[in-house]
């Protein structure tokens, strides 16, 4: 995080290629979501039930985790607990070292990106290959994902073609079918050669110790069935109480994420290979990661742990749609990232993120579980102000506004002066550069010029005109 959020955002706003890529993708995903929910019978009831299931787990997370651990162990799964990312990485490396594993394939997993697992494995001498198409392109480009479900949303297909041409030595193409074929042919070799499969988990079902993975490319099934050892790294908040709750959550996850009624592949894993099975890992491990989640659970933003990582809030957020994911500086982007990242990494180092929102409420409306994201952002903003204090200029401006707002004659005089100043700087109905402290607002956006007459002026004129 060498640059500030403001610097990263300013750079993103000036990136024409990024703006094109974001515009294409977010509009399409948001439209698909609306159409998909229209096909769900009693959609609001399903959303209510899904929300209730996730919040039930969070109310007594410790008990649910203990029950989940017992079920996993009864299924033949080895369970590990990791307090932070370093411990999680160490556990995975120790599992690989003990079994003599050298080649790993990974299904898309945000929690492994959160703890930088790939770096730790490579430092331990273990080759790691991402198998989700988007993540594979990110790895080839030595880039970072920028969206929860669409890792290369910031790339156009023309850029992807160049990345594959340079990283894989294949002929250049910008045809998506051809690009997918290139990746499929190369990754098939990796699946067959790997001895370690690594995944996250979309959900963990408490009642029977089932892990659920959802993918659209089938790579999740290859990663969990072909290698000799399967390791799943999952955040402690990923639990759901029952299989019936899982059904409801899958319905809203697919619709919110990609506009599908159900993802192409929904993989349920109960444990390692059993006698008579013709596929599956011989050895299975689940690493349950805290890494700051307990701290979030104990605070005012605990509700964010109900997030199912569908990405719907990103697709409707005017800030995300303007700057993309990399500007947020860490694994999680958009409105959810503005809450999760300060919770996991510490508010002091990420104090700018809660302010990366217009508080328009679109994220709350799009969220399949109706998480109150604006409320949580406001709470974090309040904490930043309480702990660090507001800038002197802002405090002075608010003090001045308070004085003027309680004195009608002074308020009218100040408002009239401001209106004349702004109109004097306007061109074709827009203020390109406002004076004083307002200059910061117009540095990145235009401001519509005030009307020549205020509402009060129009009202008084109308009253005088009455017979």
Image (spheres, rainbow, N blue to C red):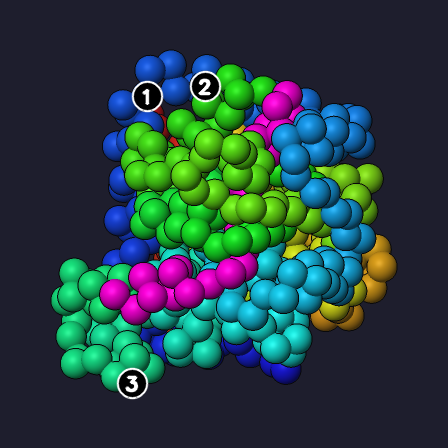
Indicate yes or no whether the magenta region holds residue 197: yes
Quadrant in which the C terminus is drawn: top left
Q: Nearer the viewer, residue 363 or 220?
A: 220
Q: Which residue is mark 2?
A: 46
Q: First in sequence: mark 2 or mark 3?
A: 2
Q: Secondary structure at mark 1?
A: loop
Q: Nearer the viewer, residue 284 or 467?
A: 284
Judge whether 210 appears above or below 48 on screen.
below
* Image position of 34 (left or right of 458): left
Q: Nearer the viewer, residue 353 or 437?
A: 353
Q: Position of residue 76 (x, y in %)?
A: 65, 35
**From this viewpoint, which residue is outermost toward the right?**
387
Q: Position of residue 342 (x, y in %)?
A: 70, 57
**In the image, what residue occupies the spot 58% across and 20% down?**
242
Q: Position of residue 121 (x, y in %)?
A: 62, 70
Judge whether 342 appears above or below 45 on screen.
below
Q: Which residue is mark 3?
A: 166
Q: Which residue is mark 1?
A: 40
Q: Secondary structure at mark 3?
A: helix
Indicate yes or no whether the magenta region holds residue 168: no
Judge whether 113 appears above or below 49 on screen.
below
Quadrant in which residue 241 is drawn: top right
Please report contact status of discs 2 and 1: CB closer than 8 Å, yes or no.
yes
Kindly report the distance in space between the C-alpha atoms of the residues bearing marks 3 and 1. Answer: 44 Å
Kindly report the distance in space between the C-alpha atoms of the residues bearing marks 2 and 1. Answer: 9 Å
């Amino acid at each position: 995080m060498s640059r500030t959020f403001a610097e990263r955002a300013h750079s993103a706003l000036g990136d024409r290629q990024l703006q094109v890529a974001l515009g294409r993708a977010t509009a399409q995903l948001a439209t698909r979501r609306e159409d998909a929910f229209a096909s769900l019978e009693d959609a609001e009831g399903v959303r209510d039930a899904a929300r209730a299931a996730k919040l039930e787990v969070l109310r007594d997370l410790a008990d649910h985790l203990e029950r989940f651990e017992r079920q996993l162990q009864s299924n033949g799964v080895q369970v590990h607990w990791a307090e932070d990312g370093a411990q999680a990485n160490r556990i995975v490396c120790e599992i690989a070292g003990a079994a003599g594993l050298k080649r790993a394939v990974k299904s898309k997993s945000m929690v492994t990106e959160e703890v930088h697992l790939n770096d730790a494995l490579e430092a331990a001498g273990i080759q790691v290959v991402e198998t989700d198409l988007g993540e594979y392109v990110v790895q080839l480009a030595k880039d970072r994902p920028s969206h929860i479900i669409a890792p290369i949303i910031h790339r156009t297909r023309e850029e992807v073609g160049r990345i594959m041409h340079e990283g894989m030595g294949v002929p250049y193409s910008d045809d998506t079918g051809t690009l997918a074929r290139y990746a499929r042919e190369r990754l098939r070799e990796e699946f067959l050669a790997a001895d370690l499969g690594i995944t996250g988990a979309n959900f963990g079902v408490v009642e029977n110790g089932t892990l659920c993975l959802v993918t659209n490319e089938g790579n999740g099934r290859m990663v969990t069935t072909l290698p000799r050892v399967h390791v799943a790294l999952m955040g402690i908040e990923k639990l759901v109480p029952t299989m019936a709750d899982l059904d409801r959550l899958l319905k809203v996850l697919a619709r919110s994420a990609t506009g599908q009624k159900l993802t192409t592949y929904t993989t349920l894993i109960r444990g390692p290979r059993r006698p008579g099975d013709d596929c599956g890992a011989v050895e299975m491990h689940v690493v349950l990661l805290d890494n700051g989640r307990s701290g979030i659970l104990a605070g005012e933003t605990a509700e964010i742990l109900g997030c199912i990582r569908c990405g719907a809030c990103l697709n409707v957020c005017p800030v995300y749609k303007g700057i993309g994911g990399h500007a947020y500086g860490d694994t999680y982007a958009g409105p959810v990232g503005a809450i999760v990242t300060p919770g996991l990494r510490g508010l002091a180092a990420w104090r700018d993120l809660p302010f990366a929102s217009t508080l328009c409420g679109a994220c709350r409306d799009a969220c399949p579980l109706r998480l109150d994201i604006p409320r949580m952002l406001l709470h974090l903003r309040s904490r930043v102000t309480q702990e660090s204090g507001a800038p002197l200029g802002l405090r002075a401006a608010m003090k001045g506004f308070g004085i003027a707002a309680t004195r009608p004659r002074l308020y009218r005089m100040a408002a009239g002066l401001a209106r004349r100043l702004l109109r004097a700087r306007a061109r074709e109905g827009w203020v390109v550069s406002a004076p004083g402290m307002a200059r910061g607002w117009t540095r990145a956006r235009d401001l519509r010029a005030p009307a020549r007459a205020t509402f009060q002026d129009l009202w008084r004129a109308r009253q005088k005109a009455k017979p």
